Amino acid sequence: MRIADLGLARLQQSLAGRGLYLRTGPFTSRIQSPIASVARGIESLYRDFEVADNSSFYDFHCELRAPRSHRRFYRPQVLFLSDRRSVFKPLACQQAYPMLEWGLNWCIANQVPYRLVLHAAALERNGKALILPAPPGAGKSTLCAALAHHGWRLLTDESVLVDLATNEVSGPARPVSLKNDSIRVIRESCPSAVLSTPIADTLKGAVAHMRPPTDAVHRSHETARPGWIVFPRYRPGASIQLKPRAAGSGFMQLIANAFNYAALGTRAFHSAGRLAEESACFDFTYSRLDEAMQQFDRLADGR
Amino acid sequence: MSRRRWQRTDGLQQRTLGQECVVFHPGAGTTHLLTPAAAALMDCLTAGVAMDEAELARQLGLPADGTDVELGRWLSSLQSADLIRGRH
């Protein structure tokens, strides 16, 4: 069964009761929340995702609820709990849905011990993975959202999963987080993209999420071979530039973007090493999304 | 030329990536990108075997003039990263 088959009323019932068991790629998350905006967000953005039955094994247990204090009534707030432990400061209640997304990101970054997890976006074409590691503000999610609507299959916009034994690349294909001006940019460049209503005044500014394309969700269990590692940088007014980068310094930048490198130690070192060996590494500067799309098409076609 | 002997730290993991070399120190949890010269020096050192500086210089094909300064700088930076240890 998929979220779209469940309907809003049953979805709300599951969330408010024993929890919704949501499958995203290799993970199952048990999500509990009585908050209506969380149910609406999941219904709109996760409509193509599978629901597991509520006796399944789950990887993450997430709960969003009001704090047990006066702040449930006065300027209401929301807490994110992982395994019944609050892991973030409370936020204003209208930020409940983005908080779910941030919380799920936190779970993957902190609770996955059997894969190398990179803070990066990733897409697939012809069986090969394009990995885009970058700090916030580099234009990674904007590029990722646009590529996901221009011939590339979305793997993830946030958490790349690398199998420690095979080095196959995958991702949970969850909604893509867009901030501030990138919301307008994606609305204009990808008219078929479904975006949530932007939430203003979050710590990251205005935030909206893009529904992942249906095909990407249905194929979220398919892995990809390492193909390209591209370090993107958005610079207003800059000419487009794709510059090869030496594998060694690419490796160092890659591990700087790994969430669990220190925890995995030697296994992560060799996994990231193989990834850098098997991929072509580049630095990429851009200012115009249409030019960037063409550049990535040329890269995929070997031109 | 110093007769000081040098030995590679136990347990290091090393990979060559193109022209570059990266080393992971499991004990410290640190990773280092080595210059080609430092990587060549590390390659000379066999695990568990100490080698003196004169032999290292010979294997690296360093010229006699100024050898001490250049080799000394590489050894010092590798030592400060705990990738090699000096033994008298």
Image (tube, rainbow, N blue to C red):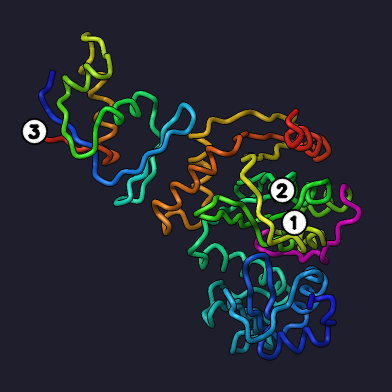
Q: Position of residue A133 (x, y in %)?
A: 61, 46
Residue A169 lies in the magenta stretch: no
Task: Pinpoint the chain carrying mark 2.
Answer: A
The residue drawn where x is 61% and y is 78% is A62
Q: Nearer the viewer, mark 2 or mark 3?
A: 2
Q: Is residue B71 above or below residue A205?
A: above
Q: Position of residue B31 (x, y in %)?
A: 39, 43
Report helix, strand or loop for mark 2. Answer: strand
Q: CA distance from mark 1 to mark 3?
A: 59 Å
Discs 2 and 3 lie in a common subunit: no
Q: Earlier in the sequence, mark 1 or mark 2?
A: 2
The residue drawn where x is 46% and y is 54% is A261
Circle number at residue B88: 3
Under mark 2, the amino acid is: Glu
Of residues A249 and A153, the one nearer the viewer is: A153
Circle number at residue A178: 1
**Image-quadrant location for residue A12:** bottom right
Task: Pinpoint the chain carrying mark 3.
Answer: B
Magenta stretch, main secondary structure class: loop
**Which range of residues does the magenta coloring cover?**
A189-204
Residue at the extreme front of the image, as rendered = A166
Q: Is residue A301 above or below residue A11?
A: above
Residue at the extreme right of the image, as rendered = A191
A250 relative to A175 in the view: left or right: left
What residue would you read off at disc 2? A124
The residue drawn where x is 54% and y is 43% is A275
Of residues B2 and A216, the one nearer the viewer is: A216
Q: CA distance from mark 1 to mark 2?
A: 20 Å
Residue A190 lies in the magenta stretch: yes
Task: Pinpoint the chain carrying mark 1.
Answer: A
